[in-house]
Image (cartoon, grey):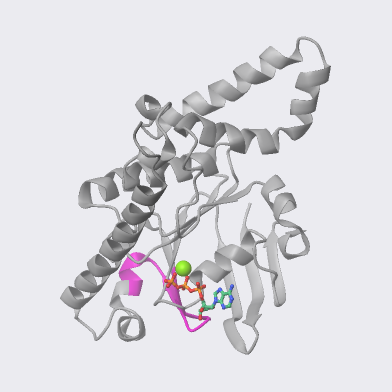
Amino acid sequence: MTLRFVGLRKRFGSLIAIDGVDLVFEPGKITSIIGPNGAGKSTLINMCAGSYKVTSGRILFEDVELQRLKKHQIAGHGVARTYQNIRLFDGMTVQQNLEVCLFSSYLGRTFAEVFVPGVSQRFKNERAALCREALARFGLTRFAETLAADLSYGNQKLLEIARATLLNPKVLMLDEPAAGLNHGETDHLKETLRSLVRPDRVMIIVEHDMSFVMTLSDHIFVLHQGRLLFEGTPAEVQANFAVQEAYLGSPGDVDGIRVAARNRANRVRLRSNANIERRRPAPV
Ligand SMILES: Nc1ncnc2c1ncn2[C@@H]1O[C@H](COP(=O)(O)OP(=O)(O)OP(=O)(O)O)[C@@H](O)[C@H]1O
Ligand SMILES: [Mg+2]
């Protein structure tokens, strides 16, 4: 099923963050959205997931107008996302972080578990199996009982993605999945994301790490000041002069791009580590 943004606009007071954007996302492909800070990438994801109200325009998932729906209804149509800043339950284990997600979506079943004799064990087994599968797929099995706060940053990011994929989403949107990861973690993430491609799944990745984007994406949208600047294959994007000027720095300034991306990633990593230190329970 195809996802379409049609004449999409988002205004925050006097700021027009998204200014009439038309994008088509095909299933079975990895589509990336790139652009400088403040271009409006996260705003697009937030609108599609129902976190931000659309100012005008439509978000069509086949014939469903997602912009008319509430966040939980959009999730019910199989739209899942991760956030630019990790949002895990730090005080819960890895397994619990996954189960919580299943509880909210299995609410009706949870009532049945309480009131219908014999149902309880079946649902418990079903949930456990889903979590086990997800842990295995993301290489997190041995951390099932570890507190989320005690995971490495890379594994926290994997856990977030694992949680988003738990219910087999039809649209999976990842906001800066590689930010703050080292080279090894980035390569592992890339392989994991490739393994998540399905013929009936739209995958959208917002990312600043250019080598990651260029080697992973089938199609790229370049956003600049809330507008679509260019779209094409990785090779077409890299060859485009306007993109190079607007986003990648002056044409040919590849070193500058790499340094900027690395500095940004390091900043994210440092911030995140500081958070983990603060939240980790004191030793007894
Ligand atoms: N909740 C909000 N309230 C007000 N302004 C916002 C809000 N969210 C985003 N903006 C503004 O909208 C513009 C686009 O922001 P957005 O976060 O979508 O950019 P981005 O492309 O994701 O940038 P980055 O690469 O830094 O994450 C920015 O000018 C930002 O300050
Ligand atoms: Mg963003």
- Can you see residue 24? no
| Residue at the extreme left | 255
Q: How many marks?
A: 0
Q: Quadrant of the C terminus?
A: top left
Q: Is residue 251 above or below residue 53?
A: below
Q: Is residue 256 above or below residue 106?
A: below
Residue drawn at 25 percent across, 73 percent down: 260
Residue 182 is left or right of residue 113, and the answer is left
| Residue at the extreme right | 115
Asked if the stretch drawn in magenta spans residue 235, the answer is yes
- Can you see residue 8? yes
Return the residue nearer the eye: 195 or 42. 42
Residue drawn at 29 percent across, 65 percent down: 267
- Residue 31 in percent (x, y) is at 46, 60
Residue drawn at 44 percent across, 40 percent down: 159
Return the residue nearer the eye: 278 or 265. 278
Q: Is residue 235 above or below residue 98?
A: below
- Residue 24 in percent (x, y) is at 57, 65
Asked if the stretch drawn in magenta spans residue 198, the answer is no
Residue drawn at 27 percent across, 46 percent down: 185
| Residue at the extreme bottom | 14
Residue 219 is left or right of residue 183, and the answer is right
| Residue at the extreme front | 284
Return the residue nearer the eye: 259 or 281. 281
Quadrant in which residue 50 is drawn: bottom right
- Residue 266 in percent (x, y) is at 26, 62
Residue 58 is left or right of residue 145, and the answer is right
- Residue 212 in percent (x, y) is at 30, 58
Span colored in magenta = 221-237
